[in-house]
Image (cartoon, rainbow, N blue to C red):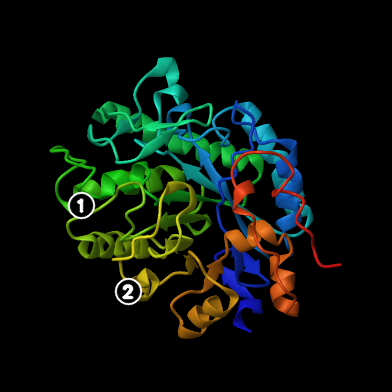
Amino acid sequence: MKLNTPFQLGPWSLSHRVVMPPLTRMRSGVDGVPSPLAVEYYGQRASSGGLIIAEATQISRQGQGYPQTPGIYTDEHVQGWTEIVRAVKQKGGKFVLQLWHVGRISHSSFQEEGSAPVAPSAIPPAGNAFTSNFSRVPYEVPHELTVDEIRQIVADYKAAAERALQAGFDGVEVHAANGYLLQQFLEDNSNLRQDLYGGPIENRSRLLFEVIDAVASVWPLNRVGVRLSPFSDVGDMADSDPQALYEHVISRLSELSIGYLHLIEPQARAGLVGEPNTSAPKSVCTIFRPLFTGPLIASGGFTVESAEAALEAGVADLVAFGRLFIANPDLPARIASGQPLNAPDPKTFYGGGEAGYTDYPTVP
């Protein structure tokens, strides 16, 4: 089975191709410091030579959009993550931190002095936001970022990348998917700007590449991944020509020789942030694989069988399993040995304590 074969991902020699993707679980402290339970949770899921991408982690207070999600912008955050990194590395795992700014997918209860969330343009998404106390209310009209404020966000990404390095991570992933800030700049239903960050595709993709440049001033590019969700309508996203947009973005990412491209299949269930886009192409990995010469991670609703088929067809080099990794701490070993898989319990995905987090059984 190809899932069980080694792969060289940039500087990392992986013993298998089963990846744990970023999985929001809403179990950090209210200050964004990962809980002690997270040390056990990630340690359980680490495997020798396996890749874990840590849950989406806000680069600043402004970047938060869900209650009890972790941060990477204070010394206390670094200390919390350092303990988790140690647990993963003790098992021989490779550990990457996903850097996150939600943009308009936020609420004033998360913001300094109750200010409005921020976005490329003052356009609220359809649907309901989380508040800091887990209630749901309609999204607010976001504040349209000034150029100076955009530059500060780029600086926040760089500072977060530096803190990830301090915490001992092996690399970072730039989150430009699922309707969050960087995708809001990319797509023209949420970006109506008329300046250097709006209009043509080159302008709308400017912020993403400025962020990558900032992160790459801290990390070698072969330790930087980028996550995209082309054709996804999660977060009320849409573009007038998504094919041209993502051909441009992915071709440029290939030219940069980033560490990996992480693509989310649009028909996957989207968990916290929405339902699948059933009108989208069946597989964006199949469409965009020819444009990206580096390693490609496919994510979104894969079974062991469909993952194996994707690897055999050459449309992906590694496959990420979300819900299956939640329910099966020893997922790579179970796949390798053909053991039956635990079923995940969606009622315990978000918030809470040990139940549905650290209490799933492993194979003896």
Q: Position of residue 215 (x, y in %)?
A: 45, 44
Badge 2 crowding class, 10 Å Cα cut-off, few under 14, some 14 to 19, many 20 or more, is few
Question: Which of the image's four quarters has the C terminus?
Answer: bottom right
User: Which amino acid, by three-letter code, is at mark 1?
Assistant: Glu
From the viewer's perspective, tell me whether residue 202 is left or right of residue 184: left
Q: Quadrant of residue 145?
A: top left
Badge 1 crowding class, 10 Å Cα cut-off, few under 14, some 14 to 19, many 20 or more, is some
Return the mark for residue 78. none
Is 273 situated above or below 311? above
Q: Residue furthest front?
A: 347
Q: Position of residue 262 (x, y in %)?
A: 46, 61
How far apart in space, not on screen, are marks 2 and 1 (Cα)? 21 Å
**Along the line of sight, which residue is nearer the eye, 267 or 85?**
267
Residue at 64% x, 31% y: name it: 33
Is 273 situated above or below 130? below
Q: Secondary structure at mark 1?
A: helix
Q: Residue furthest right?
A: 364
Residue at 27% x, 29% y: name it: 141
User: Which amino acid, by three-letter code, is at mark 2?
Assistant: Ile
From the viewer's perspective, tell me whether residue 333 is left or right of residue 280: right
Return the mark for residue 287. 2
Residue of label 1: 202
Query: How many labels, in total?
Result: 2
Name the N-terminal-most of marks 2 and 1. Answer: 1
Q: Position of residue 180 (x, y in %)?
A: 38, 44
